[in-house]
Image: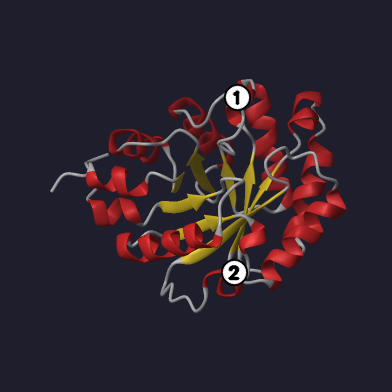
């Protein structure tokens, strides 16, 4: 892939603030920065929704609002994940990034995993999006394939590499390439976790990512060729 301009790369970015100690003033700053940088979306914790009640009147323009479900462990029950998704949609989320149960991936329980995705999908009406976080750095290649297949079977719109909180690490080019190969061209692939510079972000796009989750958006975009 040829180099991406800052403006082109910005359209891939979910500008993210999921720190457990985040406060409303930081969310307000995230919103302002997202609009300034022209990113695709912001991603915040569900307790920060609806945005207007936390940061006052907001003008996001075309910037979408994403939040997380079952985050970061994925160990929540199916009904809890579904309720979280329902509440998030009611509170203004455009996109839901849900975490699969990694233990169930290790056990090979594809049908159970697909059922969790389907339960969330049922609470997230189109054209709102469901992204499924598989924690790829903690999985073997076969487990990545199984998790992606479960996401497809449950009706997801995207598969996503990582929460950014697992000790095994975040996104890798190999994982993104494998995920893209499994889901084909019809689903999105989101690379997240450990993406902190322009070269890494572009490498993920070249590998097949259609979205980048990061908190270092300004630094990443500043590295783009002028």
Crowd class of label 1 (few under 14; some 14 to 19; many from 20; radius 10 Å): few
**Residue marked by disc 2:** 127
Q: Quadrant of residue 146?
A: top right
Q: Is residue 100 above or below residue 34?
A: above
- Name the residue at 60% across, 24% down: 167
- Name the residue at 23% across, 46% down: 222
Name the quadrant of the N terminus. top left
Q: Earlier in the sequence, mark 2 or mark 1?
A: 2
Mark 2 and mark 1 in contact? Answer it, CB < 8 Å.
no
Q: Quadrant of residue 163?
A: top right
Nearer-the-camera pick, 63 or 105: 63
**Residue marked by disc 1:** 167
- Dot 1 falls on a residue whose secondary structure is loop
Q: Is residue 42 left or right of residue 18?
A: left
Q: Outermost residue, left direction?
A: 226
Residue 189, x across and y down, in percent: 51, 44
Crowd class of label 2 (few under 14; some 14 to 19; many from 20; radius 10 Å): few
Q: Is residue 8 left or right of residue 80?
A: left
Q: Is residue 3 left or right of residue 159?
A: left
Nearest-to-viewer mark from 2 and 1: 1
Q: How many marks?
A: 2
Residue 179, x across and y down, in percent: 55, 35
Q: Outermost residue, bottom direction?
A: 57
Q: Quadrant of residue 149?
A: top right
- Name the residue at 48% across, 40% down: 191
Q: Is residue 88 above or below residue 169?
A: below
The Cα–Cα distance between marks 2 and 1, rounded to whole angstroms, is 33 Å
- Dot 2 falls on a residue whose secondary structure is loop
Residue 212, x across and y down, in percent: 44, 46
- Name the residue at 22% across, 50% down: 5
């Amino acid at each position: 892939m040829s180099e991406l301009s800052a403006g082109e790369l910005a359209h891939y970015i979910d500008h993210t603030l999921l720190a457990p100690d985040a406060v409303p003033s930081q969310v307000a700053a995230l919103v302002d920065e997202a609009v300034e940088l022209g990113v695709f979306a912001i991603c915040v914790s569900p307790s920060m929704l609806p945005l207007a009640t936390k940061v006052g009147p907001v003008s996001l323009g075309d910037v979408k609002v994403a939040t997380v479900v079952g985050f970061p462990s994925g160990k929540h029950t199916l009904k809890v994940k579904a309720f979280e998704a329902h509440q998030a949609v009611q509170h203004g989320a455009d996109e839901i990034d849900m975490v699969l149960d990694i233990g169930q991936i290790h056990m090979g329980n594809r049908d159970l995993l697909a059922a969790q995705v389907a339960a969330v999908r049922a609470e997230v009406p189109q054209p709102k999006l469901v992204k499924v976080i598989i924690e790829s750095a903690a999985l073997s290649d076969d487990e990545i394939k199984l998790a992606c297949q479960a996401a497809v079977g449950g009706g997801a719109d995207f598969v996503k590499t990582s929460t950014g909180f697992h000790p095994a690490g975040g996104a890798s080019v190999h994982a993104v390439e494998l995920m893209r190969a499994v889901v084909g061209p019809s689903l999105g692939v989101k690379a997240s976790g450990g993406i902190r510079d322009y070269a890494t972000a572009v490498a993920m796009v070249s590998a097949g990512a259609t979205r980048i989750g990061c908190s270092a958006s300004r630094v990443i975009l500043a590295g783009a060729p002028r």
